[in-house]
Image: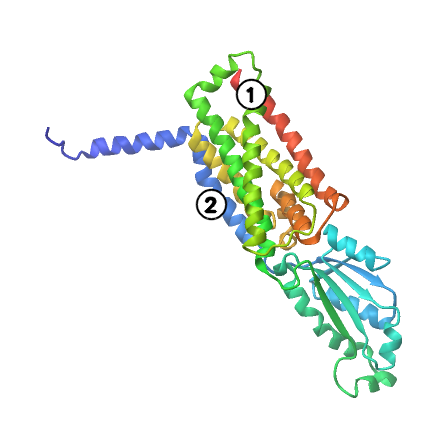
């Protein structure tokens, strides 16, 4: 059989056919345009490795012009935003554990008296160091502020205090939860969320679209089993798969990367279970929008992109602008990152976990409701 000669007309016909097919697949065409735009916006405007306005609480057992000057100097750096006045160290530790503040500045009761005696007293700055990148620059700025306070307030009759040279006081920094700044302790707990999110959403979306393409889903719904029973029955095996994946990651985190497990494993597995359920509902919802397995994968990637960039996994969450934090607050991975780090690194209990656990539960319920209604319309 002889080969046909190359024909421009036939070649151009194939090209036109591909363009027509792309135009008909609106999801694919939207991904072609949407992904570059989303990446440009996120990397250009949302990503910031030098976060500012980090929430800071003050425990001021001594209030004087010197302490007020130092607090004002902290504000002017742009790295610290004073959000609360706390009564004691216990309240400060609780605020750090819950993640409501990044820093707590503790000024002792005898600070000014010792300063005027030339005894070089110390303030204590406690930091939530679960994410070392988020606090690195801010921590580096606090010691330089001592000299600025001295030059402003140590004058006249107090000038003799600075005559001997050296700092008039010091700021001791205590980094909690990850004092050595080990990257694995921050990354590995969040990596569990990334792996579970990617696999659960993709596996659910592909499994259901595959059944729709083969016609087996319609056959199943032709039986007395109703759509809700079909959907819940199909996602239960993936819940067990997610728990197995999480167990493997936890074993590797503990024995390969030295990540501590300070909190309750029961609490951690409850959080994992809720997070897996949330991602399975995402997969079901995306599969209702996809017409085939390729589109299911495309939608999965489109969902996964803001999750990995805006959840605090790769970049500090508080370093992002307000609009990016608002988007990140809708992503389940954002809450899972806080919950997993809180349990593993801080030893948080349920009262500390609840502020980040209830949004995850609400997300699951709302999306499951949407998924049930969408599937009923799609598969009936």
Q: Identify the residue at image location x=40%, y=31%.
A: 23
Task: Give the quarter of the image for residue 193.
Answer: top right
Quick check: can you spot residue 323? yes
Where is residue 45? Give x, y as percent. 57, 52
Residue position for label 1: 230
Q: Is residue 343 left or right of residue 69?
A: left
Where is residue 128? Give x, y as percent. 70, 58
Q: Identify the residue at image location x=77%, y=67%.
A: 124
In this rendering, is residue 254 above or below 329? below
Where is residue 138? Give x, y as percent. 67, 64
Q: Secondary structure at mark 2?
A: helix
Q: Is residue 258 left or right of residue 167?
A: left
Pick the front one: 40 or 158: 158
Task: Give the quarter of the image for residue 260.
Answer: bottom right
What's the colour scheme?
rainbow
Disc assigned to residue 36:
2
Q: Residues within 10 Å of mark 2 (few under 14, many from 20)?
A: few
Mark in front: 2 vs 1: 1
Say which quadrant the N terminus sits in.
top left
In this rendering, is residue 318 above or below 194? below
Where is residue 341? Give x, y as percent. 65, 50
In this rendering, is residue 214 above or below 123? above
In this rendering, is residue 238 above or below 221? below
Q: Is residue 237 left or right of residue 117?
A: left
Quick check: can you spot residue 315? no
Disc assigned to residue 61:
none
Task: Give the quarter of the image for residue 175.
Answer: bottom right
Q: Identify the residue at image location x=56%, y=34%.
A: 240
Q: Secondary structure at mark 1?
A: helix
Pick the front one: 132 or 177: 177
């Amino acid at each position: 059989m002889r080969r046909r000669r190359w024909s421009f007309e036939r070649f151009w016909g194939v090209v036109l056919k591909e363009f027509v097919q792309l135009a008909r697949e609106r999801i694919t065409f939207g991904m072609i345009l949407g992904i570059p735009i989303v990446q440009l916006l996120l990397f250009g405007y949302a990503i910031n490795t030098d976060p500012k306005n980090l929430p800071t609480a003050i425990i001021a057992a001594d209030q004087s012009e010197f302490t007020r000057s130092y607090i004002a100097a902290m504000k002017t750096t742009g790295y610290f935003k004073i959000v609360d006045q706390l009564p004691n160290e216990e309240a400060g530790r609780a605020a750090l554990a819950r993640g409501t503040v990044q820093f707590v500045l503790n000024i002792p009761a005898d600070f000014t008296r010792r300063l005027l005696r030339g005894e070089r007293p110390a303030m204590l700055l406690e930091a939530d160091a679960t994410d070392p990148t988020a606090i690195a620059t801010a921590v580096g700025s606090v010691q330089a502020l001592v000299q600025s306070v001295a030059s402003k307030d140590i004058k006249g009759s107090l000038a003799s205090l600075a005559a001997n040279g050296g700092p008039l006081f010091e700021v001791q920094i205590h980094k909690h939860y990850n004092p050595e700044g080990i990257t694995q302790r921050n990354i590995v707990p969040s990596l569990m969320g990334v792996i579970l999110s990617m696999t659960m959403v993709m596996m659910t979306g592909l499994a259901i679209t595959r059944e729709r393409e083969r016609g087996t889903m319609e056959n199943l719904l032709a039986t007395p089993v109703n759509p809700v029973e079909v959907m819940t029955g199909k996602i239960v095996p993936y819940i067990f798969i997610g728990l197995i994946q999480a167990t493997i990651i936890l074993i590797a985190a503990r024995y390969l990367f030295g990540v501590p497990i300070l909190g309750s494993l029961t609490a951690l597995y409850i959080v994992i279970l809720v997070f897996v359920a949330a991602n399975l509902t995402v997969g079901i919802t995306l599969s209702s929008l996809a017409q085939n397995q390729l589109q299911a994968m495309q939608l999965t990637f489109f969902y996964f992109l803001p999750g990995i960039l805006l959840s605090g996994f790769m970049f500090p969450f508080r370093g992002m602008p307000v609009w990016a934090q608002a988007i990140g607050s809708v992503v389940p991975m954002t809450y899972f990152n806080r919950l997993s780090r809180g349990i593993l690194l801080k030893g948080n209990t349920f009262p500390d976990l609840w502020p980040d656990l209830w949004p995850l539960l609400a997300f699951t319920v709302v999306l499951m409701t949407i998924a049930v209604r969408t599937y009923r319309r799609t598969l009936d």
